[in-house]
Structure formats: C-alpha cells, structure tokens
Amino acid sequence: MNFKNFFLPASFFFIIFLYLFSLPPILSTGDGGELIAASFGLGSPHPSGYPLYVQIGKIFSLLPAGNIGIRVELISVFFSILTLFLVYFMVFKLSGQNLEASFAAIASVIFLALSYSFFGQSIVAKFYTLNSFFVMLLILCGTIVVLNGYDRRMQFIASFILGLTLSAHHTGFMMIVPLGVLGFFYFRNFLRNLPLSFLFFFLGFSVNLYLFIRDMKGNLFTMIPVIDMDSFLKVFLRKNYGAGSSIDVTASGFVNFYGYFYAFKNYLYLIEKNFTLFSIPFFILGVVWLFKKSKKLFIFVLTSFFIYSIFLAKLTFSMQNPDIHELYVIGHQYFIPSFAIYCGIVGLGSYFIYSIFEKYGFYSLKKIVPIIVIFFPLLMIFDRLTDQYQGKNYVPYSHTKGIFTSLPVASIYMTYGDNHAFQGWYLKLVGRYREDICHIVLDDYKTMVWALHGCKPYSLYRGLFPEFFDGNLIDLTEKYRYYSIIALSEKHPLYTVVDSYPYFYIFIYLGKSSDKRNFDTFFMERMKKIEPFLNYEDCLTHTTDDVYTLQLCNFSTIGYISIAKAYEKASDKDIAEVVFDQKLSYGDFTAPFRMKLKVNDENEKYLSIYNAVKKYNKMDKFHLSGKKNEKD
Amino acid sequence: MKKISLFFLTVLFIMLLILYLRLFLQQKDFINEAKQTNSPVKAISYYERVILSYIPLSPYNREAVNGILEQCKKIDNEQKLYCYETLRSALYQVRSFYQPYREEIKRLEPLIAEIKTHEMIQWKYNNLSERDYQRLYNYNIEILRYDGSPSVFWSMVSVLSLFAWICSICFIIFKGFKTPINKRYLLWGLTGFIVFFSLWIIGLYNA
C-alpha cells in the first residue's frame, strides 16, 4: 500500500469518526428540533419548507440506530463527508494528479473538516452541508466543462441540480451566476441547449410539489400550510420574513455599495476565526495557480467564491459590528460553501509550492513537506474538542424535558422564539412526552397570535382544556395551569391582565385579581415537589460553546433561584437579601427579572449551582465572539 | 454510476458502524451510572439515555427498560408519571421501521392515563371531582393512543421513489444524451422517471 492509499481512507475514516462521536446525543439547538420533527412527520418546517432535506431526513429517521434525533443529525455528517470528498477530488484534479497533489488535497480536506464552522454545521441537524454538497457538485460540473470541453450533459445536470437546490437551501441557487458566466464562454452550445436545460431545471424544482401534496392532507407538523399558489409563494419566497424574504434579500445586494466594505471586513473576520490569517498567502498562491491553469477556470471558480463570500456577506452580513446573535445565526452557518471553495484554493496554493520545490530541484523537500503539512491542520482538533464537541450535550433535551416535567397535568405551555419552541415540538411530536400539555407558540412578542402544533388534534385537547378553547385564559391562570417562557413586560398584551412569576425554569401567569398569598403557598409546595427534577449537571458538562446551549443554561438559572426561594425560612428575616436583578431578552424585547433571596444553610447549595452554571456558560465562550462581545 | 452508488453506500455503512460503536459505549456508561446512583429520578434519566442510545439486539436495551420499571415502583404519583412517561417517550424516540417494545408501551398507556386523571382531579384548583373521572380518563387515553405520524410503508415508498426518479433523470442525462443520442436509454430512463415520479406522489399522499 502506498502513502496515498493509506492517508486518503485514513483521513476520511478519522473525520467520520470524529464527527459521529461529536454529534449531539439527541437533538441540537436552534432549528434542530423543528427539522427533526418535520423530517419524522414528513411535514414542512419554516419557510422555504426544505422539502428535499425533510425527505432525506425521513429515510434517515428510519435507520435502526440510536434515537430519531441523532439519525436526522447523520444527514449533516453524510453530506459533509461528500462535500469533503468533492473538495479532495477538485484539488486533486486541478493540481498535478500525482502523489503531492493527493497530499495537498488531503491537507485541504482536513483543514476544512476541522475548521470551526464547517465542523459545527457537520454535527447538527441543519441543511448547510447538504447545500455545500450541491454547490461543490455544481462547481465540479463547471470544472469538468472547462477541463474536458463543452458537454451538453454537464449543462443538463447542472440545470437539474440548480432546480434541486431550490428544494434545499436557496443560497445554492446562487451558483446560477458563475454557471451563467461559464455559459458565456460556450454561448452557442449553451443557448442551443437552453430549452432542454429549463426542462431539467423544472424537473429538479418539482421536488417542491411535496409542499402541496403533504399539506393537502394535513400532517403531523407544518409550520405554514401550502394550499394554493399564493401560500406556496409565501412559503417558497419566505415572504413572512419581510425584509428577510428571498427577493428582498437578493435585491439588497445591488444597493448601498458601501455595505460591501463591511461585508468584506466581516467575511475576513470569519476567515481569520476559522482558518487563521496564515491561510491567506496559500489562498493567493492557489488563485495564481488557477490563473496559470486556465483563465476560464480562474474566472469560474473566483466568481463562485465571490458569490458565496463577499456577495452573500453583503446580502446577509454587512452590519457594522455584528453582535453575537448575528455571528452565530449568519456568520457560523451561511458561509460553509465559501469555506469549502476557500480550502480547495488553499490546497491548490500548497500544491503550487510543491511544484516550485520540484522546479528548483528541492526533491527531498517535495517528498517530506506534503506529508508534514497534512499534520498541521490536525492541531485544530484540540480546539474543536473544547468548543464544538457536542457528544455530551444533553442540554436542549433535558432542559425542555425538565420544563414539561415540572408542569401540572393538563397545563398550557407557551413559548416564543425558535430555541424553546422547536425543542418543545421535538419532545411533544417525536418524543410524545407529556401529551397532556398543550404547547402553544407565540408568533410575535407583542401579539397573542399563536401556533397550536403542540396540541393536535384539537378535538381531543378541547376536552382537557375547555377554558382555553373557549378563550377564557384568566380561568386557566386561576387554576395555576398557564405557564410560559415569557416574563411579561409592558409591551406584551397580557401585561395588563396577568402577572408573571418565576416557576422553575419558566414563568407562571396569574390573574391580577388573584390572591397572592394563596400563590405563595402554592409556589412553596410546588417548588419542593418538583425539586428532584432539577437538572444542573447537563449545564456543567456539555463541553460546547454553542450559543443557544449557553443561552438555555443561562435561562435555566431562574430555576435554581426559584427552588432556593422556596427553601427560605421564617427565621431568616434578619438575614440580608441577595437581589437577582437582570433583564431577560426575547428577540428585540426585554423583560425585567428581579428576585430577592435570603440565603440560609438549606438553600445555599442552589446559589452555588447558580454561580457554577453562570460561570460555565459565559457567553464569551463562543469562538466567533468579537472583542465587543467578549467585553459584554 | 455504479461507483458513485458504491461510494455513497460505503460512506453510509462506515457511518453506521461507527455510530453503533458510539451508542454501545454510551449504553455501557449510562447503565453503570444508573446502577451507582441512589436517586430514582437520576437513575431513570440514565436508563432513559441507555434506551435513547438504542442498538438492535443490545442486551442493555431490556436492562434499561426493566431498570426504569423497577424505579417506577419506588416513587410517588407525580414522579411515577415522570417515570412511565420517560419510558414511553424514550421508546417512541427509538422507533424506526419497527417499534421496539411495543407491548411495553401498550401496557404503560392505561397506567399513564390513570395517573393523569387522578392528578387532574386532585389538583385542588381545578374544581373537578371523581364524577369527572371517566370523561377525563377517556380524553387522556385517546390522546395517548392517537398517533399522527405518517405511515412507515408509504413514507419509504415515497422517499425511495424520490431517489429513484432523481437517479432516472441522471440516467437520462448521462446515458441518453450521449452523442449521438441513445434512444433506448432515453426510453428506459423516461419510463423509470414516470413510474417513480408517480409512486413518489402516491406515497406522499398516502403517508
């Protein structure tokens, strides 16, 4: 066995091993719970519906291994590996196709695989690695055309894949620009085959029929039902996101050109955080190599890179100072395809150096350096095992389960925001845990418009919640059966009629006219009863810097104070109070949270837990945090 | 095409093997943790994680199910509800094209409905009495027995058909549109596409 035959499978085996051991054991935060629930139920998650992802998710959810959550997470690993293989193949093909080329390609694969964001997206239930796979596949089609000459089959297959991207993640479709540019070089053949290309494009696009067919019948989980062309366009074009809709976002690329400066600055920041600035000289050398290899290829690959880096950053990431949320939701996710292209070009840059060794007769260097270079990116593994390893991250599951467990039978549980809502859906729809709870999801903090995915079928839930279905929410609050993750502020419509009080990890709503003394007794009894369900271990052992996990753990600290409060004693009256005064954020809204606590021998341990959890889950752990965020 | 399919299948197969290894190690760890703890709630949670790391034919699966049932006997009503619900939920979360321990779920559901109904009546703020027992029990048991998940058979038909029609299109493009056009392959590809596309639609509707 030669070096190539050893290093290539060994590298891929190692990466698969690493990813699989780093997968969250049940579900990942953010969209994870929703995508798993939608995949399991063959439903439709948030716009644009992601029909292809959901259908692949369904088949993965049927694998007889582990739980449904981890099976759907496998999709990310699977497409991540395929993307990495395409990167290897491209670097190998575009360099010398010899042993050194293979080593350069393996090094760039490891470099990409162990980079912060690519690693992160490869182990969570999300569609970004599937999207990267499509983008790399389209780049491969273009490369084959340049290397082997025009072939109509490449045009047809690229058109078909472009159609498919519109049933996965819309950014995949942006490959139409570099492919169009390439088509310009072969415009006669390109135009001749355009009608058939349209046909193949629409065949790929037809995967979106899924949304119509599944919603026609009604299914376990649909975020926004597609029943006609209007609703289809609303979902497909993500119109409900307003300025974030697909069309508006695309249009923003052609206005305010000063924004390109911030786009460049922010993207460079991501490159630094993912690959360090040392990679840039290799990237430049790779660009030079491409130029030498073929001008057409140079234009095609660089256009692809520009579209998925600076242009995409202009559309989504051109704010002056991105905050932690923007870094996490945009910076950590959207640019995965550009990172794959970047690492491919870096690989070509390394090969360029090896070819210089050969040119100037440094044969021993040419033999040794490529092997040594493979080991350099492996150093990143130590970082990944301390920031991205999620193999022990039970937080999204146990936190949500803790909330459900703490609720009395037949309670309303109201959530707002993706993180809490999606995990609730997973637990109720996939896990079928505590089906007596009616989980409602607020659409907007300022309204009482909610989604009822978590209490279907209504005919059965109506029997358990006649008050709720008849619109008498106050009656439910008087029965201590209305709970929510939302602490009320004056912006919320319920603020004038009910008060919110901390209850375990969440809040209980109580009518303003209710007797507070009865509530105090209820609170004391209830907290002591559910105290055994308090789970803080998961928030002290998750080993990840995942922002939503940190947020959940910080949110859960309300629970430790609540329990500690219940263990205050009458004899504590002379003890000085510790005041917990903070603001809880719900998207753009904040609600005050203030609790006074007298610390005694009995409740002191909960305070220690509080401090330990706060310390372990500091938000500045997040790898992409900027200096500003670190100060906060 | 054969090489590509083989590559896809090999990656998937290696992934499954490594996943089984991880799950097995997890099961072993959590079984030990469950045996060492004195807290029933924690033991239940550890056993739950054993089940959630389900591997077909693993001896730890049954041990965890029995472990949870054993703990359920030691605790009061509200914790018992947590215990039964945890077991039922964990088993539902590991279903694939078959449901492991289906008989356990069937046995648990009346017990869960019973506890829930009692809890609702005993919740002193509810104004419910024993006369409401049967009505509430019926709602609770019906909710527990209601399964809104799609049919496994039709789901498999639809998703496999989707992959098949995508492959048919690739076949048409790569084999049929060679220069010169190969009409035989085009016809085969087109037939495959029509059959699988129809099956995909039918499967999606019936799932």
Image: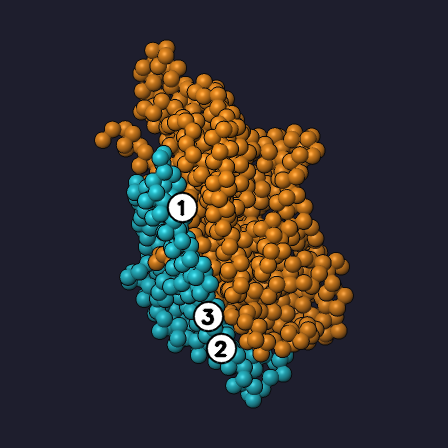
Which residue shows up at 53% across the image and 36% down it? A176
Mark on residue B142? 2
Q: CA distance from mark 1 to mark 3?
A: 36 Å
Position above or below: A332 against A233? above
Mark 3 residue type:
Asp
| Residue count near mark 2 (Cα–Cα under 10 Å), binned few <14, some 14–19, many ≥20 | some
Mark 2 residue type:
Glu
Could you say where residue A70 lies in the image, as x and y percent from the top left?
42, 54
Q: Secondary structure at mark 1?
A: helix
| Residue count near mark 1 (Cα–Cα under 10 Å), binned few <14, some 14–19, many ≥20 | many
Q: CA distance from mark 3 to mark 2?
A: 10 Å
Mark 1 residue type:
Ile
The chain containing the residue under callout 2 comes to B
Q: Secondary structure at mark 2?
A: helix
Mark on residue B169? 1
Q: Secondary structure at mark 3?
A: loop
The tint chain B carries is cyan
Could you say where residue A492 lies in the image, as x and y percent from the top left?
73, 60
* Mark 1 or mark 2, earlier in chain: 2
Position above or below: A570 against A72? below
Q: Which residue is mark 3?
A: B147
Nearer the observer, disc 1 or disc 2?
Answer: 1
